[in-house]
């Protein structure tokens, strides 16, 4: 039927272009639909959670964990509601991941607690029999980078109009010192649910360990 096309390089090139352009449209257009707008109730991440997300990326947790639940019964039974595009509206960059060596973490905040994460990140094998996840002892010693997280929040607020400071959404204050104070308050709440006395004393002395920021981020995955 299309033999004549193969003999006409010009029209062949046009046909290839149209085919690829159509495929591109099919991918791009749904993003403009009403259902792709931010889901009601989705909030931007707090500065502490952003710092935790940066640790998630830095430690490459996304190499083994996805954050994208597919609309299959086997997945929704295990992880909860399948992911909606509007849930990622303020996620820059998103961390969908492409491989599940470990389970999906999109809604892990619904069924794991701060002290569970604490024990698991320190010693996965001691927490889950036969786990092949590596331990992350340095997260308990290094301090989280709040400065970068603050700069990031400020940037997405200014450049992409991410709705910080709107209603009861997280606050991004005008000064770094104020942002650090807010992050510390939130860190104290997380550390209050943890067991390690050293973590509590670090936070009490105004220092936020990486593990606290990471757990704040994991708890926000709902
Ligand atoms: C080498 C692959 C690998 C890496 C890297 C990895 N994990 Fe895992 N993770 C696993 C496996 C396998 C499991 C399942 C066994 C277990 O619970 O320990 C798991 C389980 C988990 C769970 C429990 C989820 C549930 O539903 O029970 C959490 C939370 C988690 N990982 C967080 C992290 C975080 C945070 C990082 C980065 C600091 C990370 N993982 C890095 C492989 C990995």
Image (tube, grey):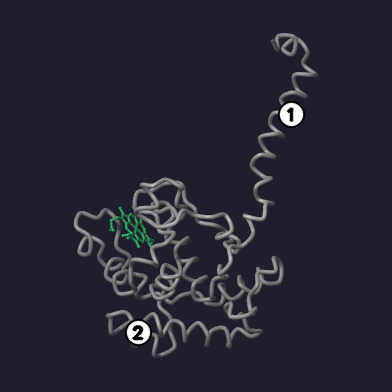
Q: Nearer the viewer, residue 155 or 74?
A: 74
Residue at 67 percent of width and 72 percent of height: 157
Q: Nearer the viewer, residue 90 or 81?
A: 81
Q: Secondary structure at mark 1?
A: helix
Displayed quadrant of residue 44: bottom right
Residue at 38 percent of width and 67 percent of height: 110
Side of 22 where 144 appears, left or right: left
Side of 202 where 127 appears, left or right: left
- Circle on res. 192: 2
Quarter of the figure that contains the N terminus: top right
| Quarter of image, ligand 1 | bottom left
| Residue on which the image places disc 1 | 17
Side of 197 where 30 appears, left or right: right
Tell me which numbered mark, 1 or 2, is placed earlier along the sequence: 1
Residue 17 location (% of width, % of height): 74, 29
The answer to whether mark 1 and mark 2 are in CB contact below 8 A is no
Residue at 74 percent of width and 29 percent of height: 18
Relative to 25, is 126 above or below? Answer: below
Q: Secondary structure at mark 2?
A: helix
Relative to 203, is 94 above or below? Answer: above
Residue 94 location (% of width, % of height): 54, 57
Q: Nearer the viewer, residue 210 or 131?
A: 131
- Packing grade of label 1 (10 A; few <14, some 14-19, many >=20) is few
- Is ligand 1 closer than 8 angstroms to the Cβ of mark 1? no
Residue 108 location (% of width, % of height): 38, 63
Real-space Cα separation, disc 1 to disc 2, in angstroms: 58 Å
């Amino acid at each position: 039927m299309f033999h004549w096309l193969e003999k006409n390089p010009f029209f062949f090139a046009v046909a290839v272009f149209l085919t690829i352009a159509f495929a591109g449209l099919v991918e791009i257009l749904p993003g403009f639909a009403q259902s792709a707008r931010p889901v009601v109730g989705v909030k931007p991440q707090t500065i502490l959670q952003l710092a935790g997300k940066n640790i998630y990326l830095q430690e490459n947790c996304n190499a083994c964990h996805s954050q994208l639940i597919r609309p299959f019964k086997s997945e929704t039974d295990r992880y909860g509601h399948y992911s909606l595009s509007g849930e990622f509206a303020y996620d820059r960059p998103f961390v969908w991941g492409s491989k599940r060596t470990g389970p999906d973490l999109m809604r892990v905040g619904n069924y794991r607690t701060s002290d569970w994460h604490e024990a698991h990140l320190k010693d996965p094998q001691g927490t889950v029999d036969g786990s092949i996840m590596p331990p992350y002892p340095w997260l308990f010693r290094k301090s989280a980078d709040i400065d970068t997280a603050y700069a990031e929040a400020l940037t997405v607020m200014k450049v992409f109009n991410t709705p910080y400071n709107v209603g009861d959404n997280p606050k991004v204050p005008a000064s770094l010192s104020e942002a650090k104070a807010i992050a510390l308050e939130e860190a104290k709440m997380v550390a209050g649910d943890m067991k390690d006395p050293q973590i509590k004393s670090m936070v009490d002395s105004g220092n936020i360990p990486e593990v606290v920021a990471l757990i704040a981020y994991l708890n926000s995955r709902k």
